[in-house]
Amino acid sequence: MKRKHFLLLGSLLIFLALACRFSPPESQPAAPSPSMQPVEMATSSPPPALPAGEISRTIIHDGRERSYILYVPTSLNWNQPPALVFVFHGGTGNAQNAIQMTGFHQVADQHGFLVAYPNGTGRLSDDKLLTWNAGNCCGYAYEKKVDDVGFVRAIVTDLETLINLDPKRIYATGMSNGALLSHRLGCEASDLFAGIAPVAGTLNTIPCNPSHPISVIMFHGTEDQHILYNGGAGPQSRLSVDFTSVQDSVEFWTAFNNCASQPQLTTFDDIQHQIWSGCAASTSVELYTIIGGGHAWPGGRSSGRPDADQPTKSISASDLIWKFFATHPKP
């Protein structure tokens, strides 16, 4: 009887073993086909932009509240970082004076770049009688040793918190005291600026030690009685400043940039135009001399004072400045 039970138990075990051996394998989950794989769609946010028109900005620099007006043209292409041009007013002026005198709004509209019009500093609490610390001049800003070079750098930093600037296309121009500051920026901020365009102002930052080659275009009238073409203290200047001559200013920049010694010369109407080429790092130096011209912005408006010099209409300094800047970015 026991043997029969053992035989039955053995037969059952053999049957179970065979059933396990020939049972179909467990089905595995099918791998998703490539067409079924989840795809992450690439999204790109639009570049930062600013509304068109004039924007007033205020920042704190060196313990002072400082201000500037930024002009944003409707023609600006925000798909690429824009160029930036600083326009500095003359002594005792302000940003609004620079806007009216130079007409740079219209040039920016045509060519699509940003324009910053900073305000200098003065003894009064309003925006009247403002000056720049431009080396050996001028007024309140010079007397108080105001850090205007640092202020300009702070404006660039402020703008970079809002938008993407093209670091190879930052430029400076200005009239009179603003021209002197443009020269000073060439001396002390050539790491930042690709070019400068002083109008009716010479190089009075001594010593001048630029760290990089920089393109320079100058405009000056031979009969300027505020900042004399041949140097010295101008009889109509309110300051007892011995200004550097136009010739000495040009010679410094051509020597520093290692330009050709002899310029290309053209003359027309009341204009003499000189170009020094072959300069280091693709820079250039140019000088527009206005024969018989006074202390004024060529092609622009006069300051409005009764004794103000009238600008020549043979050229537009603002148009020529942008043309020069546009072809001279940093390498």
Image: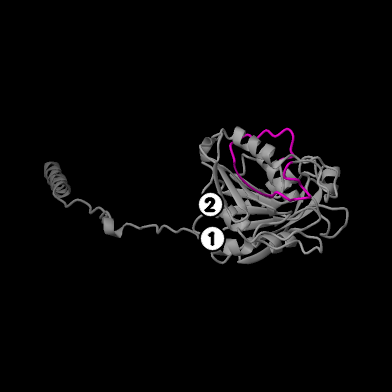
Q: Which quarter of the rendering shows the N terminus?
A: top left
Name the residue that disc number 2 marks: 326
Q: Answer yes or no: do the residues labelled 2 and 1 have beta carbons within 8 Å?
A: yes
Give, as a single range, the part of the protein colored magenta.
Answer: 203-230
98 in magenta: no
- In the image, what residue occupies the spot 73% across and 62% down? 302
Q: Position of residue 303 (x, y in %)?
A: 76, 61
Give, as a three-letter code, the residue at label 2. Ala
Taking depth in this image into account, of 25 and 163 the one nearest to the observer is 163
Q: Could one spot residue 76 in this view of the protein? A: no
| Residues packed near mark 2 inside 10 Å, few (<14), some (14 to 19) or many (20 plus) | some
Element assignment for label 1 = helix
Residue 276 image offset from top left, x and y in percent: 55, 40
Q: Earlier in the sequence, mark 2 or mark 1?
A: 1
| Image x and y of residue 87, in percent | 68, 54
Badge number at residue 111: 1
Residue 314 sits in which quadrant?
bottom right
Q: Amino acid at mark 1?
A: His
Task: Please name the residue shown 63% across and 46% down the image.
Answer: 196
By secondary structure, the bulk of the magenta-drawn segment is best described as loop
